[in-house]
Amino acid sequence: MPSYTVTVATGSQWFAGTDDYVYLSLEGTAGCSERHLLDKPFYNDFERGAVDSYDVTVEEDLGEIQLIKIEKRKYWYQDDWYLKYITVKTPVGDYLEFPCYRWITDEKEIVLRDGRAKLPRDDKTQILKQHRRKELETRQKMYRWKEWHPGFPLSIDAHSHSDLPRDIQFDNEKGIDFILNYSKAMENLYVNRFMHMFQSSWSDFADFERIFVRISNTISEYVMQHWKEDFMFGYQFLNGCNPVLIRRCTEIPKKLPVTMDMVECSLERNLTLEEEVKQGNIFIVDYELLDGVDANKTDPCTIQYLAAPICLLYKNLENKIVPIAIQLGQKPGPDNPIFLPSDATYDWLLAKIWVRSSDFHIHQTVTHLLRTHLVSEVFSIAMFRQLPAVHPLFKLLVPHMRFTIAINTKAREQLICECGLFDKANATGGGGHVQMVQKAMKDLTYSSLCFPEEIKAKGMDSKEDIPYYYYRDDGIKVWEAIKNFAEDVIHIYYESDEVVCEDVELQAFVKDIYVYGMRGVKASGFPKMIRTREKLAEYLTVIIFTTSAQHAAVNFGQYDWCSWIPNAPPTMRCPPPTEKGTVTIEQIVDSLPDRGRSCWHLGAVWALSQFQDNELFLGMYPDEHFVEKPVKEAMAKFRKNLDEIVNAITERNKNKKLPYYYLSPDRIPNSVAV
């Protein structure tokens, strides 16, 4: 009688094994096997990290194996099991791989197809078509869209982390408990003795070192030493943790009535301001989005303030970007002066602090939350709803969706919810952050997520004109590596543009993102349909780059650039100055966050800057969803290209006082998971 050798691999996560009854049956083109008992209580099979083999004997040859059914029946208590994969050796010696990489919970059963990726058009038999359809129907019931706030991209319909499907939950929920992690961070940073001292001001700038000096590192310490200097202020617009706002100024806006007399002493080329603009030496950062946003009112004992500044910058003869004018409000007038480097020292310093505080708010809520976390969640939900596990694009994208829905759900549960941790230390807490996302949605366009296109649209693409923009340089390299990889995979499965057009599951995925993520807004520029392989490659690059590189660029530098509180104040306790010549050091210190808010802020940026345990970085795909040799060769080529980028960045950073490494592929996690 024919015999099949079945090998079953259990995951290595904690509690991945099971003591339940486990049954297997095989379904082939010539018939089905009986239900075989593989494991029962106290057999000690299917333990964590185990690989177990069994011989399954059948009456007659089953033909080509199409499906494997695994059933788990409870013995005593709930005993979830993480099944990595199953391999089958047929009677004629062929090996078939059946990837799973899923949890089997309760008394559930799952049906697996072999690991070869298939488009809908490739399935010829009714049984495979039915399996494909049933998987999506089941997933669409589990992964439901829900509006968290009006105008937001839709998110997952789940109130808490424990409500999520088991497959997308964190392995250890305690590891991503924000309250626990922030408190632990403050304890590790030796600042927990200050954390309840709200309303208690620091004495002076040096006093901030009491919560800083024990945890100094190369960049954060350099920031502490140089934060007052104009070059450091300008440098952060290029290579800090929010390097996405600066743009070349083509015309001085009317709402910023800067004159030549004001800035003449800052210009170094013997040109007028108008001539400097024409030559491309003037840059601008406008925080207009903050205008009209309500400041945090959750603490009646502390009034908090926001501003919406406009900052004009200049590329000097050393090719450094430095500020030359700052207006702290959007409407010009006598009570909204334009601050200049030639003003009194404290006037100019406080104006820069206000810009840094505004930059922090835009970074946290728009650059980080909206444009990486919420957008990545849209990609993730749409993928689970519209792409079955056998689809090549599911196999390509699923590593880049790891834990994204889970981290966002936990954030809505503890961090950015009403009365959440975000309210404790941030001036945009208490609802201001919600207003900001709603306003920022109009600028969330498809082209703005295409990295090279967005850099060019801002006039920041010339390496010759702007030589020290490492965020741009490294980002372009990583974008191209991802795009080349996406193209390689696409050409394996889509032999023509017609095949792209005919892929109904791909088109449903794209439509879900447009309708639910972008709320069907035509002006977003998100495609409703993909018609060519070239456009598909770009679309997949947008998804992978956003979920990996873009998030890394704006997340993991938070401790480096924001731990020195005066350089990134999360709140301001005095209103912006309305006249010049009155600012004192005491006024600046009283404006900065109190001791309690400073410590919460420090705990937050520390916790957010840490990699996950067992982090998987860009190009690392330990779960073998793909089994075909051409795709594995494409992955190897991708990793080689990424290694070359790592080496180039490492070489450039040698001996730099301010190394830029946030877009080094060995520091880019595959997905948004923190």
Image (tube, rainbow, N blue to C red):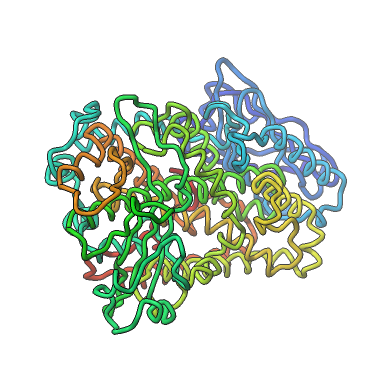
Residue 633 seen from this side: no
Q: Is residue 235 left or right of residue 418?
A: left
Residue 552 vs residue 367, the one in the foreground: 367
For the residue pair 405 and 429, the one nearer the viewer reads as: 429
Residue 42 visible to the viewer: yes
- Residue 122: image location, x then y, percent: 81, 57
Image quadrant assignment for residue 311: bottom left
**Residue placed farthest to the top in the image?**
76
Quadrant containing the C terminus in the rendered view: top left
Label count reads: 0
Q: Identify the residue shown where x is 49% and y is 59%.
A: 619
Q: Residue 366 in the image: x percent, y percent?
A: 48, 49
Q: Quick one: quadrant of the N terminus?
A: top right
List x then y, in percent, for residue 259: 35, 70
Choose between 119 and 674: the one closer to the eye: 674
Measured as percent of width and height from the top left, residue 78 is found at 56, 20
Relative vertical location of residue 487 with respect to residue 516 in this rendering, above or below = below
Looking at the image, residue 22 sits to the left or right of residue 643; the answer is right
Name, please, the residue furthest toward the bottom: 270
Q: Quadrant of residue 643?
A: bottom left
**337 vs 202: above or below:** below
Looking at the picture, does residue 60 appear above or below residue 447? above
Along the line of sight, the residue nearer the viewer: 278 or 208: 278
Residue at point 65% right, 23% down? 107
Q: Residue furthest front?
A: 334
Q: Is residue 521 left or right of residue 233?
A: right
